[in-house]
Image (cartoon, grey):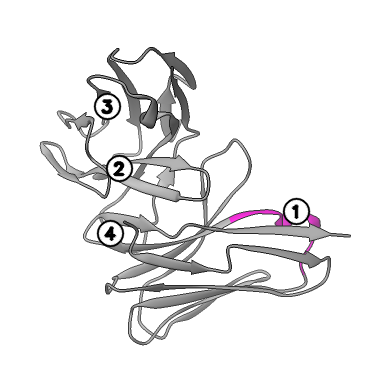
Amino acid sequence: GQQLNQSPQSMFIQEGEDVSMNCTSSSIFNTWLWYKQDPGEGPVLLIALYKAGELTSNGRLTAQFGITRKDSFLNISASIPSDVGIYFCAGLSWGKLQFGAGTQVVVTP
Amino acid sequence: NAGVTQTPKFQVLKTGQSMTLQCAQDMNHEYMSWYRQDPGMGLRLIHYSVGAGITDQGEVPNGYNVSRSTTEDFPLRLLSAAPSQTSVYFCASSYSRIDYGYTFGSGTRLTVV
């Protein structure tokens, strides 16, 4: 089964609110990645994290690589309607990329 | 520069039929992977490759074969399709350097009846 536990499974938020989701693993990863998937499309990379403790931002997105290398979180600030989608965490180690089950984000006006 | 190209986009198979899902990338990426996506399950790794001639199993390899004879291509073969293999399949590729994430194709939606 999957080694990555992602939570929450889904979120219903109002436009302008912040969103937080996290991912934990039983295994250590060299790299943590966060992807977003729109309906009918493949996942698109949002943020990549390469060092334990690293905090990285990409516009309204902020993600951190946990100190233990077994966890990561993603924050989205001031959500907008186009933030709707499924967000996946992924851990990369020696070419093997494994995914969490995803967080479905729904943004209401 | 086309990125990761998957064909076909849609396919319906009868139980027991065989087929090959094609994946090609033109970015000279060393790493390539196949995933299946089922509702509520996220993306599960089927097989992956770290270079031409090198493949390894992921989380759910049973019922699937792969080979990597060239850097560009990484086909996924279903030898005897089963209804449990109904899913959306994604191919992805990456450079081996850790500062690149995987790039995904647009997927193949497979239905086995």
Q: Are marks 3 and 1 on the same chain?
A: no
Q: From which residue to which does the magenta span run?
A: A79-86
Q: Which element carries disc 3, helix, strand or loop?
A: loop
Residue tagged by mark 1?
Answer: A82
Letter of the chain that mark 3 sits on in the rendering:
B
Residue B6, above or below B16: below
Residue type (three-letter) at the residue carrying disc 3: Pro
Mark 4 vs mark 1, CA separation in Å: 31 Å
Residue A28, above or below A108: below
Mark 4 vs mark 2, CA separation in Å: 15 Å
Is any part of residue A36 visible from this angle? yes
Q: Nearer the viewer, residue A59 or A107?
A: A107
Badge 4 vs badge 2, beta-carbon distance below 8 Å: no
Any mark on residue B33, and which? 2
Q: Residue at x 80, y 56 (%)?
A: A81
Q: Nearer the viewer, residue B34 or B1?
A: B34
Residue tagged by mark 3?
Answer: B75
Residue type (three-letter) at the residue carrying disc 1: Ser
Category of crowding for the residue at label 1, using alpha-carbon neighbours closer than 10 angstroms: few (below 14), some (14–19), many (at least 20): few
Mark 2 vs mark 3, CA separation in Å: 10 Å
